[in-house]
Image (tube, rainbow, N blue to C red):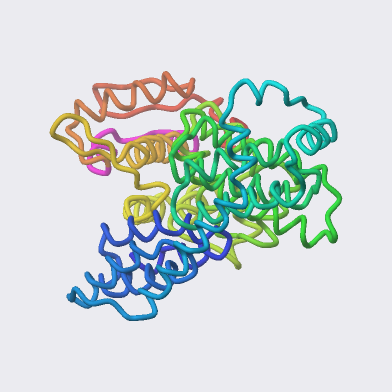
Amino acid sequence: MAEYDLTSKIAPHLDRHLVFPLLEFLQEKQLYPDDQILKSKIDLLSKTNMVDYAMDIHKSLYRTEDVPQDMTDRRVEVVARLKSLEEMAAPLISFLQNPSLVQELRSDKQYNLQMLNDRYQIGPNQIEALYQYAKFQFECGNYSGAADFLYQYRTFCTNSDRSLSALWGKLAAEILMQNWDIALEELNRLKEIIDSKNFSSPLNQLQNRTWLMHWSLFIFFNHENGRNGIIDLFFQERYLNAIQTNAHHLLRYLATAVVVNKRRRNMLKELIKVIQQEQYTYKDPITEFLECLYVNYDFEGAQQKLVECEKVILNDPFLGKQVQEGNFVTVPLRDEFLENARLFIFETYCRIHQCIDIRMLAEKLSMSYDEAERWIVNLVKNAKLDAKIDSTSGTVVMGTNHTNVYDKL
């Protein structure tokens, strides 16, 4: 299933620290040789300050207790730089760690800057040092400390570009700590800035929107309201344009969210339209499943694609999340996708056929006749189809008023 792995398309739009969870997932799934994943990790780590982690991976990869001299030298350099930045930021950090002093801060940044300078001799150099220290902490893998310092830095920062950079860093830190509620708040705050800020060029703004959608995948597939969130964001005209211009592969995640979200079936028609428009630039089993079913009415093709969809979901870092339930491990999104996809198949089938053989459906569903009959009864009831079950002939007879699926969307 490596041919359907999107990591190489997604990674360029992420902070390098956000790529680590993806590599961990791929390593667990063994989609690639273990040595290849470990080398990718070392390559990523070489551009961070997580030197100890890089040393551990090097030892594992080459099965040795020795590490290259440049790693040892790099560690000395990182420790010295961390100490230097900590000393430069110390006056402001000391101030921020005193609750009674922090109470003196106001929403007026100019007041705060003047007050810090007049009373505590804390000026622009110390504020800039706080940003550099926070960034360095992030690069060292101390995401909690980085998140706190970046939040505090933004209460003093008057440079909009630097403030935006700090917000991106805070969002990354919250994602890596799996603080999904806070991460969603930061995501919304970032979106508001991106949509309202005057960027140097439309291309720059497009790039920021593209980054935002990629980073949002971590949140939307972990937050309890994420399935609504991704649909709301990705279907906004400016963001849908960004997908069609810059990130066609994100259609996988939008399509999955629509399929599993029963309350957002009204978006299916718009989704099919976009999938058709982009079929020559991007397709995978999930988009092809919907195309087979709702464009070509190819039920055999849809069922074949559904088998592939399951494999794609299980091997996707965002979709294949496992949950431990007692002694069993489940993939909730896989189960919901298959359930809803089968409903889509038979709902559509019922709407374009006058008479349906229950035994034939039972074979396709790998069910007993009685199970299939109950399935059809529930399907007819839930979809509000004009249909009757004829138990004598073993058929479902559709009424004369049944309509094309698009009339129901």
Figure quadrant of the N terminus: bottom left
Image position, residue 8 (x, y; %): 48, 68
For the point 31% across and 29% down, which residue is it?
395
Magenta: main secondary structure: helix
Q: Residue furthest bottom?
A: 69
Relative horizontal placement of residue 149, taking residue 299 as reference (left or right) = right
Image position, residue 178 (x, y; %): 43, 39
Is 353 inside the magenta-drawn segment? yes
Instruction: Give the vertical position of 187 relative to 172 (above or below).
Output: above
- Along the line of sight, which residue is nearer the eye, 303 or 104? 104
Q: Name the image quarter holding residue 393.
A: top left
Instruction: Give the vertical position of 408 relative to 253 (above or below).
Output: above
Is 126 inside the magenta-drawn segment? no
Q: Name the image quarter holding residue 275.
A: bottom right
Span colored in magenta = 350-364
For the point 61% across and 33% down, which residue is it?
96
Instruction: Give the vertical position of 303 relative to 366 (above or below).
Output: below
Q: Name the image quarter holding residue 120.
A: top right
Image position, residue 301 (x, y; %): 40, 56
For the point 62% across and 20% down, which residue is it?
100
- Along the line of sight, which residue is nearer the eye, 383 or 46? 46
- Along the line of sight, which residue is nearer the eye, 322 or 268? 322
For the point 51% across and 48% down, which residue is it?
253
Image position, residue 159 (x, y; %): 80, 48
Figure quadrant of the C terminus: top right
Q: How many marks?
A: 0
